[in-house]
Image (cartoon, coloured by chain):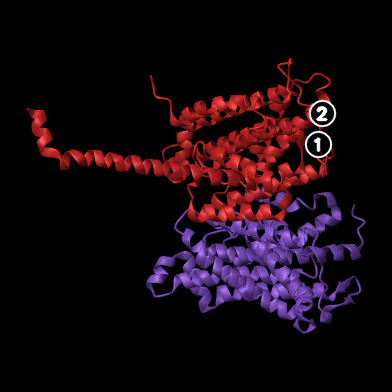
């Protein structure tokens, strides 16, 4: 049997405490954990692009926010008429993928910093639309989004039901990202991240790979956005704003670009930071900005990335010791064994 | 739709032209910084905003603090603020940016983005988001009647001054010996360094200069725009689109596309106001579809 890869082992190890959360609400408030899971999924989607494809998007709020609006409006208008919640989520993801296609196919026409600027500019259009279109609620946003019934009989209005549903979606999302990253498609993405001309010369259609990666990332970000709209039962202008794109970027950077668990760690840290400091206004922005500066200047691998590097260094040192020891103590042992 | 009076046409054209002047000055600064440092300065908008606040603080707050003799008027601010903000830019380059040149330019972008968040957050903390306003200097109050329109003097000054600044910068970079060195540094810094040119110093000063240009624009904007912590960030979004359209390859390209897009935006406001916030982005999309490298771009 093949060994279970490390990220999956960590997932299995964390699953038990995660399953117990609703039993001990005084230790970890379930709605808070759900919020963390939503943003963690969002950050995983983002990492697929920045970490494994090398594309920096400043526009992921467009997917997250618009998926939330779509799911929200469908649930508000149609859930009483019998629209299943699953369909509302699928619709949210579909909208996110469609916006991802539109923004992605324009942005991949340029590379590097231009790519970042184009995604920023186009997500600004998505924001203006959200302000102007009536049913998004404009400045007020949408409130009191009903959670509906899963499969027609599980009432998601109960927090613990919603919690297990969110956890299941997160685990599925995590496994999906893991699968994609380790698939031949994921290898192609890493190849074009590291050396695009070379990947082209080997026959990869790099533009198409990038566009698919972008749409995949947009779809997963949309899934996170739809889920978040159901968890918190609200969707607001804030979700489509640059600040949300910034947060997901920060989560990924802080946790570690291109690592499996980094985005999750980053999401947990940033969401708790916001919970504790929400009342301080401008100070939160300062702290976020300083974190960016510190991450970029001093630990570019992020928390999880630095940890991995440290572990790797340790094993390497140990291996060196084990290789050297027989040579130093060498001859007597060899003689003994040869006897 | 077309029963637009000449008066309102001229008024909107003027507003568009003034916005275009700011786009031109900011995208020129971005292009200059990008040329030598190979990073896109995400803090450009925040530096613009800081200069605007400095001008306002010198005018309205310093006298309260130290007595009326210390009031800093517009003309002094126009010189002081770019020097202060430019010096802060030099400090930033020396301490943090410099360490990132050997890395992917993603990191320079993230760093300057962090800087912009710190600056915006700090001003938001102290001044809130509502903003303050600042009147034009005495010399430029009032206006002249041009027959077909009324031209506020200060607005006329902004247009003339920014076009002069743009052309002077273009002349400096394209026609002087210093400019030749800078352009050579853009092409091949290693070779130029081998000829004995102090490239690191040149890079530092270029960053300071580009940031100083943003600050100059910021001071000029104080009497026209509401001074608030997000004024620069809002403007920068559009400037990025302008830069994508024009390309970062040439200074003249940045100037021309900045002015042209400002005017187009003004015209849209007149003909179809709902679209005026997105028209620049729509043009960007069209340019990307038809000429992916940008109108003046040489980027591969």
**Residue of label 2:** A76
**In this view of the protein, can residue B300 be seen by the observer?**
no
Residue at 62% across, 41% down: A104
Residues at discs 1 and 2 in contact (Cβ within 8 Å)? yes
| In this view, A203 is above or below B218 | above
Which chain comes out red in the rendered image? A
Q: Identify the element where label 2 is drawn.
A: helix
| In this view, A321 is above or below A24 | below
Number of residue marks: 2
Chain B image colour: purple
The percent position of residue A304, horizontal first and vertical second, equals 49, 42
**Residue of label 1:** A142
| In this view, A90 is above or below B238 | above
Residue at 44% across, 74% down: B198
The percent position of residue B113, horizontal first and vertical second, equals 61, 56
Which quarter of the figure has residue B25? bottom right
Which quarter of the figure has residue A271? top right
**Residue sitting nearer the eye, B117 or A335:** A335
The percent position of residue A137, horizontal first and vertical second, equals 83, 39
Q: Counting residues from the N terminus, which is met first, the one under dot 1 or under dot 2?
A: 2
In the image, farthest residue toward the bottom: B69
**In this view of the protein, can residue A258 be seen by the observer?**
yes
In the image, farthest residue toward the front: A26
Q: Is residue B101 left or right of residue B40?
A: left
């Amino acid at each position: 049997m093949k060994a279970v890869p490390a990220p999956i082992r960590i997932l299995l190890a964390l699953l038990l405490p995660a399953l117990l959360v609703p039993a001990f609400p005084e230790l970890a408030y379930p709605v808070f954990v759900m919020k963390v899971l939503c943003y963690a999924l969002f950050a995983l989607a983002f990492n697929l692009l920045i970490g494994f494809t090398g594309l920096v998007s400043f526009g992921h709020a467009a997917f997250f926010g618009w998926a939330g609006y779509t799911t929200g409006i469908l649930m508000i208008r149609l859930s009483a008429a019998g629209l299943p919640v699953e369909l509302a989520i699928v619709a949210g993801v579909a909208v996110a993928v469609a916006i991802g296609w539109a923004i992605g196919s324009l942005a991949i026409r340029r590379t590097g910093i231009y790519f970042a600027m184009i995604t920023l500019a186009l997500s600004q259009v998505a924001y203006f639309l959200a302000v102007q279109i009536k049913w998004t609620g404009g400045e007020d946003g949408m409130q009191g989004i009903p959670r509906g019934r899963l499969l027609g009989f599980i009432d998601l209005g109960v927090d613990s039901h919603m919690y297990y549903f969110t956890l299941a979606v997160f685990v599925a999302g995590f496994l999906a990202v893991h699968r994609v990253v380790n698939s031949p498609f994921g290898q192609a993405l890493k190849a074009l991240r590291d050396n695009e001309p070379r990947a082209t010369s080997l026959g990869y259609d790099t533009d198409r790979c990038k566009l698919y990666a972008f749409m995949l990332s947009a779809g997963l970000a949309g899934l996170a956005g739809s889920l978040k709209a159901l968890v918190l039962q609200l969707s607001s202008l804030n979700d489509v704003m640059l600040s949300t794109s910034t947060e997901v970027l920060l989560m990924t950077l802080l946790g570690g670009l291109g690592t499996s668990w980094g985005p999750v760690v980053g999401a947990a840290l940033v969401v708790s930071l916001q919970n504790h400091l929400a009342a301080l206004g401008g100070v939160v922005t300062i702290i976020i900005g300083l974190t960016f500066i510190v991450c970029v200047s001093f630990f570019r691998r992020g928390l999880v990335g630095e940890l991995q590097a440290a572990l790797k260094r340790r094993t390497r040192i140990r291996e060196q010791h084990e290789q050297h020891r027989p040579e130093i103590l060498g001859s007597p042992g060899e003689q003994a064994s040869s006897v | 739709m077309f029963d637009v009076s000449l008066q309102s046409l001229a008024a909107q054209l003027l507003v568009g032209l003034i916005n275009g002047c700011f786009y031109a000055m900011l995208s020129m600064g971005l292009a200059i910084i990008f040329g030598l440092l190979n990073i896109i300065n995400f803090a450009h908008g925040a530096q613009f905003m800081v200069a605007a606040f400095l001008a306002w603080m010198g005018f309205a707050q310093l006298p309260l603090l130290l007595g009326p003799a210390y009031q800093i008027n517009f003309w002094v601010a126009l010189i002081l603020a770019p020097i202060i903000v430019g010096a802060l830019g030099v400090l930033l380059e020396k301490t943090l940016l410099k360490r990132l040149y050997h890395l992917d330019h993603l990191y320079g972008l993230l760093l300057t983005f962090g800087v912009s968040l710190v600056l915006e957050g700090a001003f938001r903390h102290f001044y809130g988001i509502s903003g303050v306003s600042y009147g034009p200097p005495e010399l430029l109050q009032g206006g002249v009647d041009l027959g077909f329109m009324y031209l506020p003097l200060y607005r006329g000054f902004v247009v003339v001054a920014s076009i002069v600044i743009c052309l002077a910068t273009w002349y400096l970079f394209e026609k002087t010996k210093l400019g030749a060195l800078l352009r050579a540094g853009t092409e091949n810094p290693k070779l130029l360094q081998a000829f004995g040119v102090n490239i690191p110093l040149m890079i530092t000063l270029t960053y300071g200069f580009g940031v100083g240009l943003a600050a100059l624009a910021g001071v000029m904007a104080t009497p026209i725009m509401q001074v608030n912590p997000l004024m620069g960030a809002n403007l920068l979004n559009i400037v990025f689109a302008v830069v994508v359209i024009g390309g970062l390859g040439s200074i003249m390209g940045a100037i021309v596309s900045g002015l042209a897009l400002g005017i187009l935006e003004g015209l849209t406001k007149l003909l179809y106001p709902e679209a005026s916030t997105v028209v620049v982005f729509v043009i960007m999309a069209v340019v990307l579809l038809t000429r992916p490298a940008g109108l003046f771009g040489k980027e591969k």
